[in-house]
Image: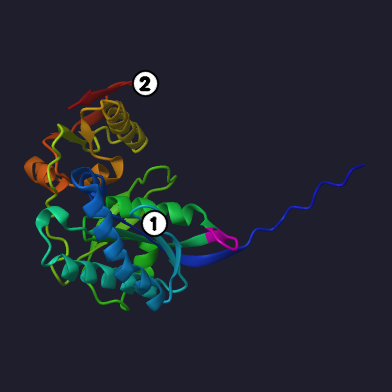
Amino acid sequence: MTEPPEKTKVARRLAAILAADIAGYSALMSANEEATVGDLKAHQAVVLPMIAQHGGRIIDTAGDGILAEFPSVVDAVECAVAIQRTMHERNTNVEAGRQMQYRIGINLGDIVYDETRIYGEGINIAARLESIAEPGGICLSGKVYEDIRGKVQLPYEDAGEHQLKNILHPVRVYRVHMAEPCQKALVLPVSDKPSIAVLPFANLSGDVEQEYFADGMAEEIITALSRIRWLFVIARNSSFTYKGRTVDIKRVGRELGVQYVLEGSVRKSGRESASLRS
């Protein structure tokens, strides 16, 4: 009888994961590709070394994003705060249409790793937290908040539990309120083409499972509109930062640099059906 192959034990460790990207990057690229790429590289030359200075290790810098891990959750949060304060200073004398602001999410979790990469749900949660952070803002998971409470002196807002995309269980989210005005509204240039942002639909059914349906409806509309060549459509990562927030449509249009904004809601109306309002 053939012996079953011995199962290879994967390497694991606990790490603080920092995920960041530039808010409204697609709109900035649409307005001026060369200037945007130049600005991004100039900012990265200052921001990326800060990760090592705070004891972190860069995992990936694809596009406008940053993925890094830290052995200390305190160091990860202090690094995020330093990045946001630095970017605020760098934006002071930059015209509004070319300002760049990072959104940052931080999670503490068990990860699988090899010589070059890290894997696991802990990383996915950090990425989802980043996607709901405000421009110039920082979102922390409940695990991070519990570890830094009393150690990093900043104002925190309990934003409640969020059902993050493709994450099985709701995650408690805390927003960091920076001492400096890093989170002032980011005004992006309006694209020359007709432009639209599709905001995440509100789930009015009281059923958590319908949250996936509501998000899926908005994503399907974004995908369908993106096939129209003459229409500029804001990417999901940018429009979904407004999920769970009461918004002013005119302000959203200014912040995302679009002419039109679509919002809607979903309500379960029967045992196997749902209704959509926009």
- The residue labelled by disc 1 is 126
- Foreground mark, 1 or 2? 1
Q: Are marks 1 and 2 in contact (CB under 8 Å)?
A: no
State the SS at label 1: helix
Looking at the figure, which quarter contains the N terminus? Answer: top right
Q: In the image, which disc is placed on residue 94? A: none
Of 79 and 87, nearer the camera is 87
Q: Measuring from the top left, give residue 102's x and y in whole percent.
A: 26, 59
Q: Residue at x 38, y 75 (%)?
A: 75
As shown in the figure, which amino acid type bears the numbered disc 1? Ala
Magenta span of residues: 111-117
Left/right of residue 149 with respect to residue 192 in the rendered view:
right
Q: Residue at x 23, y 42 (%)?
A: 239
Number of other residues with Cα within 10 Å of mark 2, as a class: few under 14, some 14 to 19, many 20 or more:
few
Residue 91 can be seen, yes or no: yes
Q: Residue furthest front?
A: 34
Query: On screen, 268 above or below 43?
Result: above
Is residue 278 inside the magenta stretch?
no
Residue 16 location (% of width, % of height): 43, 66
Residue closest to the eye, 90 or 242: 90
Give the residue at x 27% y 65%. Answer: 43
In whole angstroms, how far apart are the C-alphas of marks 1 and 2? 33 Å
Where does the image place residue 123, in percent across and percent down from the top left?
45, 56
Res. 203 in view? no
Disc 2: which residue:
272
The vertical placement of 245 against 156, above or below, is above
**x%, y% of residue 254?**
10, 46
Please identify the quarter of the rendering in which residue 243 is found.
Answer: top left
